[in-house]
Image (cartoon, helix red, strand yellow):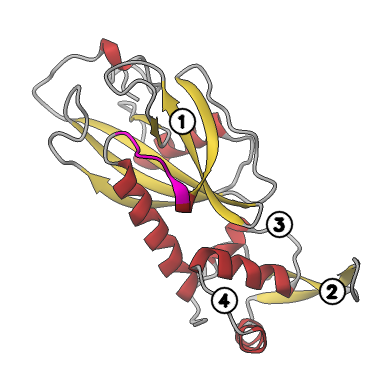
């Protein structure tokens, strides 16, 4: 996750090339969420070299000398998924002294949301592997990334209570049943169908489309968000 020449490079390199220094290195880590197979999932990468070789972690890297934190996080996302215009939010800055066994690294974590279908994971040249993991069954992660995962999930669960942020996890068109199920997957609890529909329609976040989705049961009306940018609204 660290570059041998942080002042000249915005890309990560083999951790074995890193030496000690008298100041912290600035890095970003990105927690990418999606919903697949009725489960909330996140993208992990397997470390290729160094003392944590073989361990899973969130993708990340050093911040370039002329690069903002947001730009560094978006670069990491571009390398991992073909999807553009993802919802991205800064989460927290982690700076414990011994969080990295090689050297002092202060990392700003982000979380991002990708709609279905989940893109095939990309390991690139930095990592040995990449895969989607069920958020409820993560392995023991490298660095302090289990703590990063906890905070990211807490933030997402809190955010859906008072914003429309779930638009980042949905296709452009959806049914009310699909929207309710998404809330239930993230919250981990069932919702009353009648009460949910009353609240979501009263919020005026959605617009009904002149189309239906046909399946085994009666056709279901399709909806879309009025605005696919963050808005505050009390839902629950």
**Which label sits in the foreground, 1 or 4?**
4
For the point 65% across and 44% down, the residue is 118
Q: CA distance from mark 3 to mark 2?
A: 15 Å
Q: Nearer the viewer, mark 3 or mark 4?
A: 4
> Residue at left 33%, top 30%?
63
From the viewer's perspective, tell me whether residue 204 is left or right of residue 46. Answer: right
Separation (CA) of disc 4 from disc 2: 20 Å
For mark 2, what is the residue?
Answer: 220
Reply above or below: 212 against 22.
below
Q: Which residue is mark 1?
A: 45
The residue labelled by disc 3 is 171
What secondary structure is found at the residue carrying circle 1? strand
Label 4's element?
A: loop
In the displayed structure, 111 sits above or below 97; it is: below
Q: Is 74 placed above or below 218 here?
A: above
Q: Marks 1 and 3, Cα distance to the nearest angstrom?
A: 25 Å
Q: Residues within 10 Å of mark 4 (few under 14, many from 20)?
A: few
Say few, some or many: other residues with alpha carbon within 10 Å of mark 3 (under 14 / 14 to 19 / 20 or more): few
Instruction: Give the label, 1 or 3, closer to the camera.
Output: 1
Contact between labelled residues 2 and 3, with CB atoms less than 8 Å apart: no
Please identify, in this view, whether the residue under mark 3 or under mark 2 is nearer the observer: 2
């Amino acid at each position: 996750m660290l570059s041998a020449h942080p002042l000249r490079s915005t890309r990560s390199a083999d951790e074995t090339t890193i030496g000690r220094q008298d100041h912290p290195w600035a890095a970003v880590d990105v927690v990418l969420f999606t919903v697949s197979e009725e489960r909330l999932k996140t993208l992990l990468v397997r470390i290729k070299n160094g003392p944590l070789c073989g361990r899973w972690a969130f993708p990340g890297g050093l911040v370039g000398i002329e690069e903002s934190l947001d730009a560094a996080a978006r670069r990491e996302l571009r390398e991992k998924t073909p999807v553009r215009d993802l919802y991205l939010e800064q989460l927290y800055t982690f700076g414990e002294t011994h969080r990295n066994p090689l050297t002092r690294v202060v990392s700003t974590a982000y979380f991002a949301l990708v709609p279905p279908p989940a893109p095939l994971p990309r390991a690139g040249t930095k990592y040995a592997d990449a895969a989607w993991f069920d958020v409820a069954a993560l392995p023991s992660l490298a660095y302090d990334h289990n703590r990063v995962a906890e905070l990211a999930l807490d933030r997402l669960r809190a955010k859906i209570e008072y914003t429309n942020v779930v638009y980042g996890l949905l296709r452009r068109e959806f049914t009310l049943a699909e929207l309710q199920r998404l809330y239930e997957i993230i919250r981990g609890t069932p919702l009353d169908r009648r009460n949910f529909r009353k609240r979501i329609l009263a919020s005026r976040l959605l617009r009904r489309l002149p189309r239906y989705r046909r399946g085994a049961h009666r056709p279901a009306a399709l909806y879309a968000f009025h605005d696919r940018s963050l808005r505050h609204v009390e839902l629950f």
